[in-house]
Image (tube, helix red, strand yellow):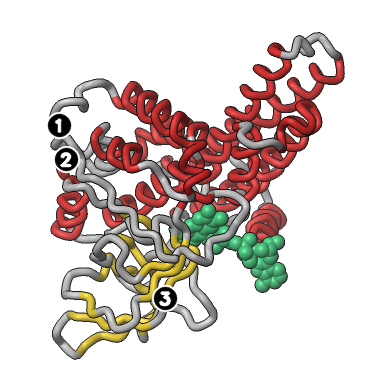
Amino acid sequence: MLKIVEFPRPRSEPGGEGQHAPLAERVRDFAALAAGKAEQADADGFLSPDVMAALHDQGLAMAPFPPMYGGEGLNEPERHGQLCATLRAIGAADLSVARLFEGHVNAVALVCRYGTAPQVSVLARKVESGALSGVWGADDAKGLRAVEDGDSGQWRLEGRKILASGAGFVTQPLVTATSEAGQILCLVDLSPGERSDTAGWTAQGMRSSATGTVDFSGLVLPAGRIIGSPGDFTRQPHFSGGAWRFCAVHVGAMERLADLFRDHLTFRRREGDPYQMQRVAQCVAAVTTARFWVEAAACGLASPQGDADRIVAFANLTRMVTERAALDVMEAVHRGVGLGSFMRPSPIERISRDLATYLRQPVPDLAMADAARSVLASEQPTSALWEPVG
Ligand SMILES: Cc1cc2nc3c(=O)[nH]c(=O)nc-3n(C[C@H](O)[C@H](O)[C@H](O)COP(=O)(O)OP(=O)(O)OC[C@H]3O[C@@H](n4cnc5c(N)ncnc54)[C@H](O)[C@@H]3O)c2cc1C
């Protein structure tokens, strides 16, 4: 059954009450709220309207825009450290919320990078008044097609997107479509619930991410809603290099699992056991290794003199390291806590389910193989491979 959740409009205007605290403080407050609502959201299969309203009220939805559009420049290269910390904090709180925020941040970055000033301004005004964006790239076998309607500047869409998170309430999605000239990016204006169906989202985790299909057939895009030029979406190094953002979210969830494991051991007075100590050490080492990789990947993408091939290779390896670390952390926590980590409503059970699901990202083998190919093609010694990146 189609579930339509209308989120309330933000209570405060950007720059208004509630947004004077430093961003880190607002992120902390928002993460605490999201963490407190995560269990209920998982049980309900949809996010708390309070959390989505707070994303706007705390200024986080606007934060990725440049200051000239009313944002805080969170997507600017020099702010990559703060964006990384923000994604980790929200990932630790609720992975479904973090998925939506990460998609929104990516969409805003793409519109700012490839769109015109009026297009950025239009999106910023929509977000300011309560909308959220996201990137919907996944296709079924037919894919989404876009046909230009003469010289009108309008485009007609045919087909649907699948695995679109926030389906039903992301009302300003950036969607990829195939056109005669190649793959284009369309910024679509939807009403809540329009064209979306989340009934098929039966995954074990990420239940409240509202991941579903959105059928755009027959939709006519008004002029000015095509962002950039054909091929921009997959332009490197940003296309693959941006993977560090979802890796940061995964690191946040791992950090939370490691904390829950430690709390469990001390509560049960099992912290002195050498086998458990070994698990704690392995967990923290794995999480911290992934965090260092993610921070280096973010730094590499932000670096103005970075070499695109190396940034991409490093990001691909970061995906591999992060996935491995997450699988290792989950195994150690499950073995160390035992059956309790599989019992509801243990947060370990929910976070593990969410993380195991969200870890499934596109073409992991290809990402790893591309990184290996890049290393094999390089004449640099391993010691100097990443000098311009990390
Ligand atoms: C919670 C959640 C939210 C999401 N939200 C969005 C969203 O908002 N927008 C969006 O665009 N997408 C979204 N996605 C989809 C996501 O980006 C990926 O497309 C999807 O998760 C990949 O799933 P997969 O494991 O089937 O990938 P696949 O790429 O099919 O990988 C599965 C396995 O097959 C292997 N493989 C892949 N291709 C080949 C091949 N040609 N030959 C042999 N082996 C191959 C891979 O290496 C891997 O081992 C979401 C996914 C999740 C889990």
Q: Residues within 10 Å of mark 3 (few under 14, many from 20)?
A: many
Q: Earlier in the sequence, mark 3 or mark 2?
A: 2
Q: Which mark is residue 160?
A: 3
Q: Earlier in the sequence, mark 3 or mark 1?
A: 1
SS under mark 2? loop
Front in this rendered view, residue 40 or 156? 40
Q: Is there any visible trace of residue 339 in the rendered image?
A: yes
Rendered position, 91 above or below 218: above
Q: Is residue 318 left or right of residue 228?
A: right
In which quadrant is the N terminus drawn?
A: bottom left
- Residue underneath mark 1: 15
SS under mark 1? loop
Q: CA distance from mark 3 to mark 2?
A: 32 Å
SS under mark 3? strand
Q: Residue visible at 24% across and 81% down?
A: 155
Q: Is there any visible trace of residue 309 in the rendered image?
A: no
Front in this rendered view, residue 58 or 83? 58
Front in this rendered view, residue 263 or 364? 263
Residue 117 image point, x, y percent:
16, 56
Q: Ligand 1 lies in which image quarter?
A: bottom right
Q: Which mark is residue 70?
A: 2
Amino acid type at mark 3: Arg
Q: Residue visible at 25% across and 44% down?
A: 65
CB under 8 Å between callouts 1 and 2? yes
